Amino acid sequence: MNPLLSIVIPTFNRTDMLDRAIESALNACGGERIEVVVVPNGPHRKWEIVKSKYCKDDRVKWFHIDLGNACAARNYGLANSKGLYVRFLDDDDYLLPSSAEQLKRIKESGADISVAPLVVFNQRSGFKELQGLPETKDFVCAVLLSISISNMTAGCIFLKSAIGGRAWREDVVLHDDYLWMLGFGAGEEKLVLMEFFPVAVYVQHDAERLSRVRRTMDNSRVLVNSILLLHQDLLATGRGSPERSSAVAAALLTHAHSVFPLAPIFFGKLIKKAQKMDSNAHPMQSMFIKYPWLARKLLVIEWVMLGPRYITRGYRRISWWLRSASLRGR
């Protein structure tokens, strides 16, 4: 008999965190039939230590691939999953017991996707905070506005048949979860169950992770083009609305503000394009949420702050590199 839920966990050289992720998945099933599909990727073999712990638990299945690529591992895990529903869990994050209630509720509702908040845990400081969902009842808008939060995908359960042939983009090294959600929002309308209780913990730590990958124009263009393509899809299929156009504009402005020093001319044009879509839209960073009127002067602010931001970006990169080097030296 096939499981109700498949939990796909890609892993790369994080044995201590992987054990925690698997254990959390097994403890958050609520008595339902589940499978934990672990996909070690890359040449390392330390994951075999964790595998030996679960060798007698047939709910945990292992599919190693040689390619060190998290999105390729997710695609391979998805292809080998047997569940009616599927969720993706990174090896450095973990599920809360409340995720069992989320599974029960999506099963009863017949929804295509269940979306729930996360707890963000800073491993270095020990600080935890609730990361709520974007404040909208429109799923497509929530997806677009999730550009301002961490890994919305970790709080989702997907009906596998609603995923269809959609795959994670294996050519990207940044924004992979956001691009996945944009793809899920395209096509046809989905039946969505929005929850308000946290179901997983997103762990911030100093070890290597995708969020520390250097931002480049290549990954920025992929992100911007994906947002614009979703907007075109919405308009072409008659699914556009003023609220969705506003969310598109806000997503573009949020990214443009985040990476403006990377290519000021390109992002200056993008800011103007977004403001033509909706003159009242503003970036999702806290400063603009508190003072939305600042968005009307966004381009001026970006140019004025360009010099200081070059300095602070360099300082952050050096700090991250030093912390990572310290961890590697232990």
Image (cartoon, helix red, strand yellow):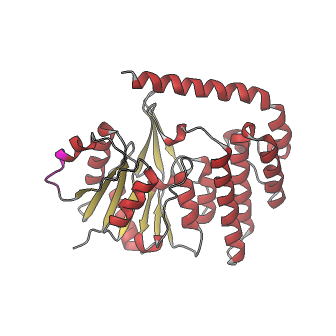
Q: Is residue 31 visible?
A: yes
- Locate residue 32, reporting x and y percent: 25, 64
| Residue at the outermost bottom position | 238
Give yes or no for residue 218 being in the magenta stretch: no
Question: Which residue is drawn at the image coordinates 16% and 51% (left, top)?
Answer: 55
Q: Is the magenta region chiefly helix, strand or loop?
A: loop
Residue at 54% x, 66% y is 184
Question: Quarter of the image holding residue 105?
Answer: bottom left
Q: Height in image: 171 above or below 161?
A: above
Query: Could you tell me which quadrant the C terminus lies in?
Result: top left
* Viewer-proximal residue among 208 and 6: 208
State yes or no: residue 56 in magenta.
yes
Q: Is residue 93 above or below residue 177?
A: above
Furthest toward the left, the residue is 56
Residue located 25% across and 72% down the image: 2
The residue range painted magenta reads: 52-57
Q: Position of residue 54 (x, y in %)?
A: 18, 49
